[in-house]
Amino acid sequence: QRNFILSRIRLKANSTRVYDPLPKGFSPNLEGVSRANETAARAMAIPGMMEAGWTMADLIAATGQGKDADRAKNALKSEMLNIVRKVEEQQFAWPFREPVDTNEVKDYLDVVKEPIDLSTFDKR
């Protein structure tokens, strides 16, 4: 069974070369790497990682760093939607609730280059 499993792994493996052990005190050059990606960059510096088919995205996902970023992104999105809801509830927000009718206001797109309204913002 073991030989069968090893043969199946060899079919899928991108690298079968065995590298020498890392030297004592191995410390890759992480200059220019953000603190958030440091762990993944350190792993990518190990000889054979790229040859084996690993990418930074794979390593970030494997170390759970991506989950923290997703959590922060979702929290920010939730906060922004809460702000939009609060603005929509205000009586002074009526001009911003729906897109401007460009048939009614002919020069609107000449003045406002990137129009946005609360309903469009909410959809996006």
Image (tube, grey):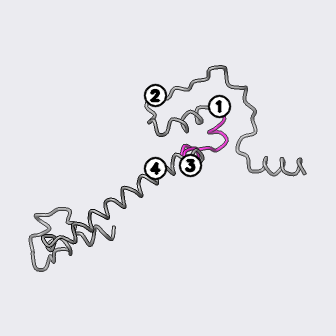
Marks 4 and 3 sit apart, C-alpha to C-alpha, by: 10 Å
The residue where tag 4 is placed is: 69
Q: Position of residue 100 (x, y in %)?
A: 16, 74
Q: Position of residue 96 (x, y in %)?
A: 17, 70
Mark 1 or mark 3, which is nearer to you? 3
Q: Position of residue 86 (x, y in %)?
A: 24, 66
Helix, strand or loop under label 1: loop
The residue where tag 3 is placed is: 61
- Give the residue type that dot 2 points to: Glu
Residue extent of the magenta highlight: 48-61
Q: Is residue 66 magenta?
A: no
Marks 3 and 2 sit apart, C-alpha to C-alpha, by: 22 Å
The residue where tag 1 is placed is: 47
The residue where tag 2 is placed is: 31
Marks 2 and 4 sit apart, C-alpha to C-alpha, by: 22 Å
Mark earlier in primary sequence (4, 1): 1
Residue at (27%, 62%) from the top-left corner?
83
Q: Are marks 4 and 3 in contact (CB under 8 Å)?
A: no
Mark 3 or mark 2, which is nearer to you? 3
Q: Are marks 2 and 4 in contact (CB under 8 Å)?
A: no
Mark 2 or mark 4, which is nearer to you? 4
Helix, strand or loop under label 4: helix
Q: Residues within 10 Å of mark 3 (few under 14, many from 20)?
A: few
